[in-house]
Amino acid sequence: MEPAELDVLGLREQLFHERVRECLICTLLFASLYILCHFIITRFKKHADFTTVEDDEDAAVDRIALSMCTFTLAVSLGAVLLLPFSIVTNEVLLLFPHNYYIQWLNGSLIHGLWNLVFLFSNLSLVFLMPFAYFFTEAEGFAGSKKGILARVYETFVVLLLLTLLVLGMVWVASAIVDEDAGSRESLYDLWEYYLPYLYSCISLFGVLLLLLCTPVGLSRMFTVTGKLLVKPRLLEDLDEQLNCTRFEEAALSRKISAGPTSCWLSLSAALLREQFLAIQSRRLALELRRGASPWQRNLAYPLAMLCLLALTGISVLVVCFHTLELLLDDAAMPRGIQDAPLGQVSFSIFGSFGAALQVVLIFYLMVSSVVGFYSSPLFTRLLPARQDTPMTKIIGNCVSLLVLSSALPVFSRTLGITRFDLLGDFGRFNWLGNFYIVFLYNMLFAALATLCLVKKFTWAVRAELVRAFGLHKLPLPVPRTRQPSKLC
C-alpha cells in the first residue's frame, strides 16, 4: 500500500477508536447515573405486594413504569451535570494541555454528551413519561382480552390522540403568532422543525418555572439549613424548655393511656396523638441541641449561614452585572455554537477559581430551585415521602425534575452565571436571540431574589429578637366583641 493510503487508513482507525471510546464513556456515565437513580426511586417508592396470579400483570406494569422513571431521573441528573462537567473539562485542558491521560476529554465528547442529553430529554418528555402514566392507569379496552398487550394497545391509542392534540395546538399557536406562510409550511417538517420548536416551548416553560422557584428557594435555603443544623443558644434557657416539653409529653401520654372515658375524648383521640407526636419530636430536637458540642453549635451554624449568604449575594450581583452588560455588549447575549473551543481560553476572568465558583453557583441555584419548587403551594403535594410515594406521584416528580434540570443550562447562560455557550440543539431556541426577553428575564430574577431575601431576613431577624427577649411569652390583648345570642 502507498504511504497516502496508509495515512488515510491510520486516520480512519483513529477516528474509529475515538468513537468507540466516546460510546464507552457515555455508556459508563449513564449506567452509573441509572444505578444511582434506581436506589433513589426505590427509597421513596411505595411498596406494593403482588401475591396472586392476577397481580403478576400489575407487577410487570409497575416494573416497566419504574424503569422509565429511573431512565428519566438519570437524564435529569445528566442535564444537571452537563454544564459543570463542560466547565471543569475546559479548565483541566487549560491546565494540562498535553497530558496523555486526559486526551479522552475533548470537544467531540462534550458535544456528544450535549446532544445525547437533548435527545433523551425529548424522548422522556414526549414519549416515556406519558407512556408510563397512561400505562399504569390503563386496563384495556372493554371486551378485549386482559393482559399486558391490552394495556399497551390502549396506551398507544391514548398517546396517539394526545400527540395529535398537542401537535395541532402548537401548529395553530405558531400560525397565529407568525403570519409568514413559509414558517407555517415549515411546521410540516416534523423532525427538523416541529420537535425542536415544541421542545423550545417546553424549555421556555422550564426557564419561567426556574424564574419563579429559584428566588423562593434562595430564601427557603436558610430555613432548611437551620432545620438540619443545630442553632446556637441566643439568650434562651434550653433546660427550661426541655422540662416544659417533658411535662407536656407526660400529660398527653397519661390522657392517651387513660382510654376513652367519654364520647368527647374518643373524638379527640386522633388529635391528642398528633399533639403527642409533635411534642415528642420537639423534645428530641431540644435534646439534640442540648447535647451538641460547642463547635457544632457555635461554629457550624454560623459558617453555613455565611456560606449561604455569600452564595446568594454573589448570584444576585452576577445577575445585576450581567444585566448592565447586556446594555453595552452584544456578546453577553446567550447564543449557541456547534463546535466547542475547549482548552483555548477560560470562561471566567478569574481563571480556575472563577470557573470553580461558577460550578458551585450552578449547583446552588439548582438545589435552590428544587427547594423553591417543593415549597410553592402549587407543588407541595408532589413532595415524595419515604417508602410511601405511589407510582403516579413518582412520575410527576420525574417530569418536574426533568423540566427544571433540562432548562438549567439555558437558565445559567441567560443569567450570565457562566460564559460557556450552549452546544448542540440547546442553542437553537428562538427566544434566546430576543434582547427584550433576555433583559427582562434578568431584571425580574434580580428583583424577585432581592425581594424574597429582604422579606426573609427582616421577618427572621424580627422573630429571633422576639424569641431571644422572651416577648413571645407575653399575653396578647384580646379585643372584646359582642356576639349576638344564638337560639338553639
Image: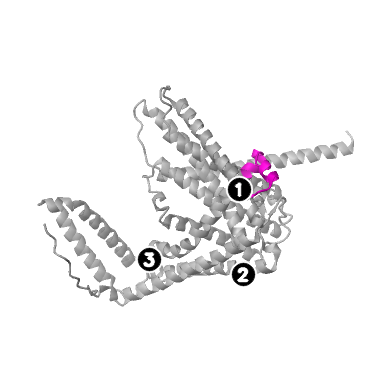
The color scheme shown is: one colour
* Dot placed on the residue nearer the N-terminal end, 1 or 2: 1
Residue 350 appears anywhere in the view: no
Q: Position of residue 11 (x, y in %)?
A: 80, 41
- Magenta range is 178-196
Q: In this rendering, which labeled residue sits more in front, label 1 or label 2? A: 1
Residue drawn at point x = 29 percent, y = 64 percent:
287
* Dot placed on the residue nearer the N-terminal end, 3 or 2: 3
Query: Which residue is at the front of the view, 101 or 312?
Result: 312
Asked if marks 3 and 2 touch (Cβ < 8 Å), the reply is: no
Q: Quadrant of the C terminus?
A: bottom left
Left or right: 475 as drawn, with respect to 206: left
Q: Position of residue 94 (x, y in %)?
A: 70, 59
Q: Say which quarter of the image contains residue 226.
A: bottom left
Measure how far apart labels 1 and 3 are at the Cα level: 57 Å
Left or right: 12 as drawn, with respect to 297: right
- Say if 183 sits above or below 450 in the image: above
Residue 6 appears anywhere in the view: yes
Instruction: Confirm whether the magenta stretch covers residue 317.
Output: no
Q: Amino acid at mark 3?
A: Val
Q: In this rendering, which labeled residue sits more in front, label 1 or label 3? A: 1
Query: Which residue is at the front of the view, 28 or 218?
Result: 218
Density class for disc 1 (Cα within 10 Å; few <14, some 14-19, many ≥20) is few
Query: Which residue is at the front of the view, 295 or 346?
Result: 346
Measure how far apart labels 1 and 2 are at the Cα level: 36 Å
Residue drawn at point x = 64 percent, y = 41 percent:
24
Residue holding disc 3: 230
Q: Which mark is residue 107?
A: none
